Image: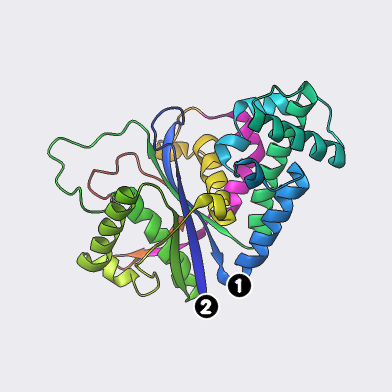
Amino acid sequence: MTWLLFIDESGHDHKTTPYEVRGGFAIHVRLLWPFVQNMRQLEVRCFGCPLHEYKKEIKGSALLDRKRYKFAGQSGLLRDEERRKLCRSFLAKGLTQDTPSANEFAAYGQACLQVAQGTIDLLRQHEAVLLASAIPRDVAKPPGYRVENYLRKDIVFLLERFFYLLDSKREHGVIVMDETEKRQDRRFVTRLERYFTKTSEGQYRTKWIVPTPFFVSSDMTYAIQAADVCIYCINWGFRLPQRGMNAEHRGEIVDMFRDDLASLQFHGQGERDGRIFSTYGIVYVSDPYEARPAP
């Protein structure tokens, strides 16, 4: 059987988030359809409608923006049917550019937080595993950098963790990515192919990883939307201070998701040069351009 690794990215515009994060979650193919159905039900249960009807989609930056927490606190917890009705009105006014009422803002904020938490809960229920790599948002290529056409170290580490997961399950895995700009996607595929065909470790990892990724549109793929929520939470709410990952964080996201992220990330064993070591699904790389350190 097969595992699917859904990958998105966060912070690649280098504007507001503290890190550049790539990753998402792996889920067994037999649990994908139940997960997608439950995501659709969660969306309608919280907002009262599918977001695509109002030209929106589930995104971490939209659900967990600082303003959403502020909106949610403007009112006591609303009853489900009242919240759904107010959310539909809020979304309709977004299309007509009318100003929502205070209650509509509150309802939408509460629905956003419920969907974010519900998404993480569904990942746990469907035995998903978090895998992600983070680098500082301001890291720069060194002068004379000559391996532009090969994968950066942080991406290699992400694939390494996926391989360790698959190896522990003795099952194959497929990479599914959010499509962006076609030229950029093609460049990434070229780097990926070189890793899997021109490096010894890449060739070895094709034992379990299918080396050809699939690209999908996020607005039509709930799993990619869920991956977006995961990596946004990692960007603002997960830290590894012992590894130097100690940039600013958002306390409200830490409080909501820190324990969930720690428990959902992959926990397993890796092997390098005959040595066995413990490894985890979320990895921080302070400089993706420097030589690879020992584990």
Residue that appears at 59% across and 35% down? 62
Q: Position of residue 266 (x, y in %)?
A: 52, 58
- Left or right, 184 with reference to 240: left
Callout 2, which amino acid? Met
As for residue 61 lying within the magenta part, the answer is no
Q: Which residues are magenta?
A: 249-270
For residue 30, the mark is 1
Residue 235: x, y in percent? 49, 38
Give the vertical position of 276 relative to 68 (above or below).
Answer: below
Residue occupying the point 39% across, 69% down: 209
Q: Given the current orientation, which residue lies at the most extreme front position?
A: 96
Spatial separation of the CA atoms under disc 1 and disc 2? 8 Å
Residue 62's disc is: none
Q: Residues within 10 Å of mark 2 (few under 14, many from 20)?
A: few
Question: Where residue 208 sits: x, y (%)?
Answer: 40, 73
Farthest residue to the left: give it.
144
Amino acid type, label 1: Arg
Q: How is the image coloured?
A: rainbow
Q: Residue at x 84, y 34 (%)?
A: 78
Q: Between residues 129 and 182, which one lies in front from this camera angle? A: 182
Left or right position of 123 against 172: right
Given contact means CB atoms under 8 Å apart, are the residues at marks 1 and 2 in contact? Answer: yes
Q: Position of residue 71 (x, y in %)?
A: 71, 25
Residue 241 placement, left or right of 118: left
Labels 1 and 2: the sequence-earlier one = 2
Q: Which mark is residue 1?
A: 2
Image vertical order of residue 220 relative to residue 175, above or below:
above
Q: Is residue 268 magenta?
A: yes
